[in-house]
Amino acid sequence: MTYKILLIPGDGIGTEIAAEAQKVLDRVLKLNGGQVEYSYGLLGGASIDETGVPLHEETRALAHGSDAILLGAVGGPKWDKLDHNLKPEQGLLQIRSSLELFSNLRPAMLFPQLAQASSLKNDVVSGLDILIVRELTGGIYFGHPRGIRINDAGEREGFNTYIYREHEIERIGRSAFAMARKRDKRLCSIDKANVLEATVLWREVMTSLASEYSDVELTHMYVDNAAMQLVRDPKQFDVLVTGNMFGDILSDCAAMLTGSIGMLPSASLDKNGRGMYEPVHGSAPDIAGQGIANPLAAILSVAMMSRYSLNEVAWADQIERAVSKVLDQGLRTEDIYTDGMTKVSTSEMGAAVVDMLDH
Ligand code: NAD
C-alpha cells in the first residue's frame, strides 16, 4: 500500500522540525518496506507570501487527496498586521474546517527522563499519561455573528458567538468515548454548565451517550476546576473531552506539565481517520533560524500519524521507543536541557532518533 502524505512545513521553526520529522518517517519506511508518495503544500505565512492567501486552493486540493498531512507550524510577526481573514492562523482554521477535522487528540505524556524539566514536583507528574480530546471545528472560534462594532451608545464592542449543535457534540463525544475505551476507560467531560447554556447542552449530550459506552466511567467537571486540578493532581485524569476554546487553553496547560511544549504531538482527525498531525507548539519566531528548536513533538506527530491514519501501530511504537532511548542517552535540545545532559541542535536530535531506529 502506498500512502499519500502531504507535507506542510509552514513558517518559523515549522520548516526546521518538519525536515527532521520527514527524515524519521523516511527511515521507518525504509526499515519496514513501506511506501509513501509525498506532496508538498504551502500554508500560513509561506502561502501568503507566495499566493496572497493563507490557504490556497492548491494546498486544499492536495489535502483532500491525501491519507494524512504532516504540518510544522504557521504564523509569525511578519504577518501579524494583516487583516484578520488574511492572517496565517486563518489558513490553519480553514484547512481543519475544510477537511472536517473535528477531533483533536492532544496527549500529555511525561517521559520519565524529563521529570526534572517539569515546573511541577516530580511526584505530581512522574508517570503522567493523559489525553485531551478537543473539539476543533466548532464553538466560539467559528460561531457567528462575530466582529467589532459601534454600539448604540457610540462605544466600540467586540462580540463572538459560543454555539454548539447537537451533532457536533455527539461526534466529538463518540470520538472521546472510543479513545477512553482503548485506555483506562475513564472520561471526564469539561464544561461551564453553571454559566453557559451551550455547555448545558454539551453536558446533556455527553450524559446521553454514556449508556452506549457503559464500560467507560463518565464524570463532569467545570473548566475552572479542571484548570486547577490539572496542576494540582493531573494524574487523576485519563481522557478529558471539551470544546474548542477550553481545549485550547487546557491542553497548553497540560503541555507545560510535561516540561516543554516542544515534546507534544497532536492529531486532528475526521470521521474516517484521515488526519492532520502537528506539534502542539507554534512557529516560535523567537528561536526560528537558530537550529535549536526541539523536533521531538514533530517526530512524535509522525508516530501518531502511523498509529491513527496509516494503521501502522508497530511503526508508531518504533518511533516512540527511539525517542525514549535518545532521551536515555542524555541528549537534550535547549528547551529540555538540565545540568549534566548533552545539549544538541535540532538536526542533531533528529539524526539521533533516525540512528536509534536501527537499534
Ligand atoms: P509558540 O508555541 O510558537 O512558542 C511559545 C514558546 O515556546 C516560545 O518561547 C518558543 O520559543 C517555545 N517553543 C515552542 N516550540 C518549541 C520547540 N519545538 N522547541 C523549543 N522551544 C519551543 O507560541 P507563540 O509564541 O504564542 O506563537 C508564535 C506564533 O505561532 C504565532 O504567530 C502564533 O499564532 C503561531 N501559532 C501557531 C500554531 C500552529 O501552527 N499550530 C500554534 C500556536 C501558535
Image: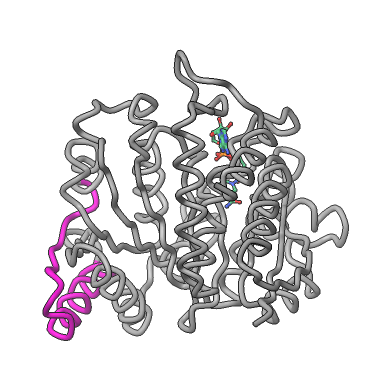
x, y percent for residue 190: 24, 59
Q: Count the numbered circles shown.
A: 0
Q: Position of residue 345 (x, y in %)?
A: 66, 29
In screen coordinates, is 258 left or right of 149? left
The location of residue 39, given as percent across then percent down, is 78, 69
- Residue situated in front as seen by the camera: 272 or 60: 272
Residue 195 in the figure: left or right of residue 10: left
What residue sits 25% from the left and 44% below the top? 227
Magenta residues, start to end: 197-224
Residue 149 in view, yes or no = no
Q: Is residue 177 a member of the stretch shown in magenta?
A: no
Between 47 and 254, which is closer to the camera in this rendering?
Answer: 254
Q: Name the quarter where the N terminus is drawn.
A: bottom right
Residue 262 vertical position relative to residue 184 in the rendered view, above or below: above
Residue 10 point in image, percent of width and height: 72, 52
Q: Nearer the viewer, residue 291 or 329?
A: 329
